Amino acid sequence: MAMKTTQKISDSNQFDVIVIGSGIGGLTVAAILSKLNHKKVLILEQHFIVGGFTQEFKRKGFRWDIGVQAVTEMAKGDIGRVVFDYITEGKLQWEKLPNLSDKLVYPDFTFEIYSNPQRNISDLIRMFPEEKASIKRYFSDLQKVTIWYKIHLIADFLPKWLQRLIKLCVGRLGKLARLTTKEYVERNFRNPYLKALLTSQWGAYGLPPSQISFGIHAVAMTSYGKGSWYPVGGSQAIVDCILPTIKKAGGMVLTQRHVTEIIVKNGVAKGVKAKKTHNAKAEVEAYYASVVISDAGAFKTYTELLPEGYATAYRNQITAFPKGYSMLFLFLGLKESPEKLGFGTQNYWIFNTYNHDQALQEQLAAPDKIINSCMLSFPSLKNHTVGRSTAEIIIYADYNYFARWQGQPWRKRDPDYYKLKEKLAQKIINFVENYYPGFKDLIEYYELATPLTVEYFVASDKGSTYGTASVPERFDQKWINAKTPIKNLYLTGTDALVHGIVGATIGGVMTAGIINGLFGFFKVMFAIIFPISNSKKEI
Ligand SMILES: Cc1cc2nc3c(=O)[nH]c(=O)nc-3n(C[C@H](O)[C@H](O)[C@H](O)COP(=O)(O)OP(=O)(O)OC[C@H]3O[C@@H](n4cnc5c(N)ncnc54)[C@H](O)[C@@H]3O)c2cc1C
């Protein structure tokens, strides 16, 4: 529904570029266009904190981040690192995390994962010697499919005839990438424990083995194998180091501005309308720019922000596309360092069964009765500036389970919502306590966030956490792209490319590339890699 506004175009609401949402994808494209093209960028963020999933929050002297456990591709010279060095002007430092990156904790064994594929291969072969050949083939397939994925992306920027030729050459790997991970492991392995082990980290991309494409599984696993880093100063440092780059070119961020509509005239994006989230009576504001970029995800952009009648085919396809899941986040403030119980910087994936798909469905249906798995991590062991010790537990959950309290104000929902939250928090704590006796005694403070909290703070569709679901069909959707059918409107972040800090960041680079015209991606990458040659580029 189009809303009326009376505001006229003036210097105060006219910008070169408007970015909807301040997630890492939005911040990246804003910083590149500010630095490379000297554009005055306005970022409109609906929340009162900047950063989307890269935001931090504080309670009672404890500090947690939300969507940053470990970031890959951050060695000097890696793609993620060169982009971050560019957009932060080298200000953001990264600390390499220990090689022991993950612990997979099952009822009758534990398996450690290292950022060292050779070691993981040997450990798996020692445990499952009868599957040696398949294990070796699996790791080789992960590499090949990751290369396919990169070629598949770059091909988009090449002439059509070359695209067709390239796709023909790597077609076999494309077929492998379009299997689900469950299909891949069912075809290649016999031992159910091994099948479970290899798919244990499904929580890191948000879909269980029967739904996630083997392609995205491969990209994730391959990047973890190269090591993980953590931003020095925590996720807040990411935001703090990028914003000056945007401000230097005259840009700014306005928080508590919920964009309600993209203004389109004659098929061309001209600006946006936004509501102040902290003042229901305030007039709708209008902001204008010759480029509008959305970091709000494909679903919201096409189905809610674009006026009806535009991009109808995309809108219909997105509405029918499978949805991702949401989560419960249990944020814990600890009395003492978790090292006391032997915990470290790694992620702990804890399971009470080996069938991830079935376990998830049971948990989604009744989380207050059944918890089958969780991911436990300790932000304070990675962020030395955080002060007091913290832990964070993540559990997959169904938005619909909480839908009856939808629309009620944050912190003022019905008492039975808070009763349920308390029950869930206790259930989750007891689940971990079962595996790590003494854990409960470490806890001084806890707070549970539900899918409604996620929806409130990052405005994602039904509190989903990883953007458009990475099912195999995602590879073939034209709307998973920085380009849109509306002139001067672009997508960025996760849905311009793929989930993850680096995925959404490169999504930002892709958007800046397309805005920079023919071979723009290569121009932008050149400027990022060789910043010295960085003169103003007209767009
Ligand atoms: C629990 C969890 C753990 C994770 N851990 C890791 C990890 O360890 N490593 C890693 O690489 N990745 C991790 N990720 C993934 C990563 O955090 C995300 O993929 C990435 O941050 C997404 O960035 P984005 O820019 O696409 O979008 P988002 O961060 O979702 O930002 C979108 C922004 O747009 C705003 N917005 C939406 N609609 C509107 C509107 N209408 N008007 C104004 N503003 C709007 C939102 O408020 C939000 O700020 C994790 C994610 C989760 C959920």
Image: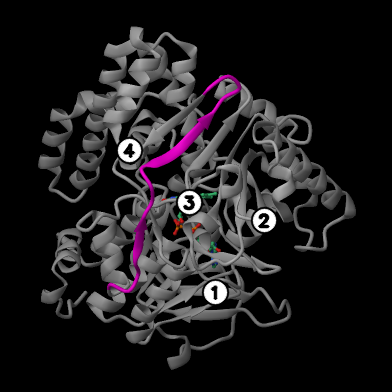
Q: Quadrant of residue 327?
A: top right
Q: Quadrant of the C terminus?
A: bottom left
The residues tagged by marks 1 and 3 sit, at their Cα atoms, a distance apart of 34 Å
Q: Which residue is mark 4?
A: 219
**Residue 237: image x %, image y %?**
44, 70
Residues 152 and 306: in front is 152
Residues marked 2 and 3 touching at CB (< 8 Å): no
> Magenta segment range?
90-109
Number of residues whose C-alpha sits closer than 10 Å to that of mark 4, classed few (under 14), some (14–19) or many (20 or more): many
Number of residues whose C-alpha sits closer than 10 Å to that of mark 1, classed few (under 14), some (14–19) or many (20 or more): many
Front label number (2 vs 3) = 2
| Beta carbon at label 3 within 8 Å of ligand 1 | yes
Who comes first in sequence, dot 1 or dot 3?
3
Please tell me whether residue 92 belongs to the stretch shown in magenta: yes
Please tell me whether residue 402 belongs to the stretch shown in magenta: no
- Residue at 38% from the left image edge and 47% from the top image edge: 98
Element under label 3?
loop
The residues tagged by marks 1 and 2 sit, at their Cα atoms, a distance apart of 43 Å
Kind of residue sitting beneath label 1: Lys
Q: Which mark is residue 69?
A: 3
Residues 465 and 381: in front is 381
The residues tagged by marks 2 and 3 sit, at their Cα atoms, a distance apart of 18 Å
Instruction: Give the farthest residue toward the right.
Output: 415
Q: Which residue is mark 2?
A: 334
| Beta carbon at label 1 within 8 Å of ligand 1 | no
Counting every numbered tag in the picture gives 4
- Residue at 22% from the left image edge and 35% from the top image edge: 148
Who comes first in sequence, dot 2 or dot 3?
3
Front label number (1 vs 4) = 4
Q: Which residue is mark 1?
A: 273
Q: Quadrant of residue 225?
A: top left
